[in-house]
Image (tube, rainbow, N blue to C red):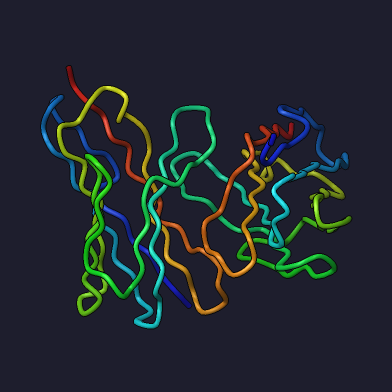
């Protein structure tokens, strides 16, 4: 079955700097890759997603890049702000159309 | 729209007790899911329902049962709670044929 690995588990960056979180997956047939943000004590919420027919997608300060050959995709956050502090999860849709989740990255924005 | 709602928000059980977690969505979604989230871990799928009338096991179904009562409601039952089931439980839903999942606020369950 699909296996998703997410790195790093914790990322601390200075406010205003960029943050990059990477996920790798195993099933080359996977074609949908969302990223979710979960603030402390809250529910996960979709922040951006990408499908296999594109290599990059941007939404203001957030971007996702996909390398299907290498089977990895990354979340890029530029000009980080205090409200970006949260846990970020990547996920991959498997052959049963279910999402397989990474273990999460705790992003800490230092003032 | 309220989106996805869950009850209760918090529950304490003793080992061996039973309870049902309720989930409802008002977005006319076909698919619904139950996850558990343990500290430092991602979301693990317990059961899902691709459409009204169907349910399937996910990654960690042991110790749980589900009922898709109608299109709106999907409940999760613990017949005999164990301390290992202490977790935060999230319900989610998605439109048929679309992958985006919308989550409820979660239920924090503590089994003593």
Q: Residue furthest bottom?
A: A29
The reply, left or right, for residue A30 in relation to residue B89 is left
Instruction: Relative to A85, say whether B99 is above or below.
Output: below
Residue name at image x 26 percent, y 73 percent: A71
> What count of labels does the image hold?
0
Residue name at image x 72 percent, y 27 percent: B10
Rendered location of residue A8, percent (x, y): 24, 48
Q: Pick the residue in front: B17 or A18.
A: A18
Q: Which residue lies furthest to the top in this view?
A: A111
The reply, left or right, for residue A72 in relation to residue A90 is left
Q: Pick the residue in front: A66 or B65.
A: A66
Rendered location of residue A58, percent (x, y): 24, 51
Q: Pick the residue in front: B109 or B14.
A: B109
Residue name at image x 13 percent, y 38 percent: A18
Where on the picture, by quarter, is residue B68?
Answer: bottom right
Residue name at image x 56 percent, y 68 percent: A98
Rendered location of residue A111, percent (x, y): 17, 17
Rendered location of residue B90, percent (x, y): 63, 44
The reply, left or right, for residue A7 in relation to residue B1 is left
Q: Pick the residue in front: B82 or B25.
A: B25
Where on the picture, by quarter, is residue A68?
Answer: bottom left
């Amino acid at each position: 079955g699909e296996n998703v690995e997410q790195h790093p588990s914790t990322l601390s960056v200075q406010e205003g700097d960029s943050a990059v979180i990477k996920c790798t997956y195993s099933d080359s047939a996977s074609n949908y890759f969302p990223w979710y943000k979960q603030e402390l004590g809250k529910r996960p919420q979709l922040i951006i997603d990408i499908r296999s027919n594109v290599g990059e997608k941007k939404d203001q300060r957030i971007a996702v890049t996909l390398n299907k050959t290498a089977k990895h995709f990354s979340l890029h956050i530029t000009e980080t702000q205090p409200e970006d502090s949260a846990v970020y999860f990547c996920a991959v849709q498997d052959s049963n159309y279910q999402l397989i989740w990474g273990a999460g990255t705790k992003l800490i924005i230092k003032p | 729209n309220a989106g996805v709602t869950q009850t209760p928000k918090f529950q304490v059980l003793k080992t061996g007790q039973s309870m049902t977690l309720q989930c409802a969505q008002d977005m006319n979604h076909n698919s619904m899911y139950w996850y558990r989230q343990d500290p430092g871990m991602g979301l693990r799928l317990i059961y899902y329902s691709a459409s009204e009338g169907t349910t399937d096991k996910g990654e960690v179904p042991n110790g749980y049962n589900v009922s898709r009562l109608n299109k709106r409601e999907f409940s999760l039952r613990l017949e005999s709670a164990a301390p290992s089931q202490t977790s935060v439980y999230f319900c989610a839903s998605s439109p048929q044929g679309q992958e985006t999942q919308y989550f409820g606020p979660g239920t924090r369950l503590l089994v003593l």
